[in-house]
Amino acid sequence: MKRGLVIGAAGFVGNYLINEMHRSGMECFATKLSHEVFENPYASVYDLNILEKEAVANLLMEIRPDYIFHLAAQSSVGVAWKNPCLTIDVNIKGSVNVMDAIRELYYKPRVLLIGSGEEYGHIKEGETPISEDTLLRPGNIYAATKACQNMIGSIYSKAYDMDLILVRAFNHIGPGQLPLFVVSDFCKQVAEIEKGLREPVIRVGNLEAKRDFTDVRDVVRAYVQLVQKGMPGETYNVGRGKAIKIRDILDEIINQSKAKIAVEVDPAKLRPVDVPIIEADTIKIKKITGWRPEISIEQTISETLDYWRKRVLKEMEAK
């Protein structure tokens, strides 16, 4: 049985990824920060800070994984604007620590380095859908750190003959995502409105931006297939391959709500720089793995709304 390690499992994607790894027949291991709470019945969980390289190396020697999924990151664009130093430390220095620890092992595990569709940044007319060869023009701090991780990973793969596979994951959504992210934020607001906890108004940022949204369960299927079938040193887009206007997402959420809701622009939610459209060209991953998304946006929204309805009710009952 192959051993798979998820570094940074306590975030939104971790549980979904471990469940998918288990379904694919892997023995699962996971790491979290010491202050984080994370449990999954299929995984042995360890505390790890990727800014401590020796600790990373010691854990890899103990577990000896065949596959490593590097999820640990500061992944919020909004937080990156407010705290660029933290974002640089975790996303660049932390990733290099992980790569160096892997490089010093006596064997060669397969490694998936998770980046972001945000790396492409300012897309020019005629560049959509965005292929992996598109020139990177990062438009925010988070995107710049992930572009740097990708470049360093590509160099390490070639220079040190490491089995690194690089991913640019576009927006992924689903039940359990923090309300720092737009779809979860809207669904949480709707759930609170339905329970009378806030006035029937959703406060929004830029609704005209178009983004490529994929259900997190489809995304983790792509990760498992890529770590098994991807080519070392290559970068693969993971996304639906169809951009959707944020306004249309909000309309669908309101359509599925049980309340009459107004919409107002909140200047605090407007980012300093916003890219008009981000849409993935997914030909490369489909060609090598056969993967394609299976869960509709409508289903994801329905299940995310239900997640927040249950959570809001539970919090009300606890008071």
Image (tube, rainbow, N blue to C red):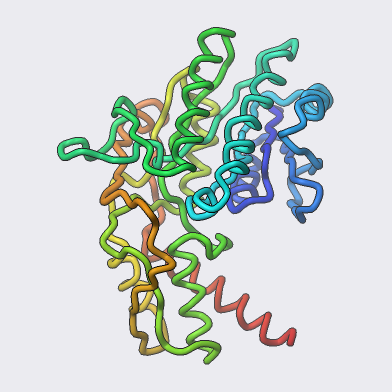
Q: State the image coordinates of residue 19 (x, y, percent, origin top left).
A: 63, 47
Horizontal side of residue 227 vs 102, given as left or right? left
Query: Residue at image x 71%, y 34%?
Result: 50
Image quarter for residue 55? top right
Image quarter for residue 249? bottom left
The correct choice, above or below, for 144 with respect to 164 in the image is below
Q: State the image coordinates of residue 65 (x, y, percent, origin top left).
A: 72, 26
Q: Quadrant of the C terminus?
A: bottom right
Looking at the picture, tell me which residue is in the foreground, 131 or 208: 208
Image quarter for residue 239? top left
Q: State the image coordinates of residue 311 (x, y, percent, origin top left).
A: 62, 75
Query: Residue at image x 38%, y 62%?
Result: 270
The correct choice, above or below, for 159 with respect to 70 in the image is above
Query: Residue at image x 43%, y 35%?
Result: 168
Looking at the picture, tell me which residue is in the foreground, 142 or 260: 142
Q: State the image coordinates of residue 208 (x, y, percent, origin top left).
A: 26, 61
The correct choice, above or below, for 243 with respect to 303 in the image is above
Q: Quadrant of the N terminus?
A: top right
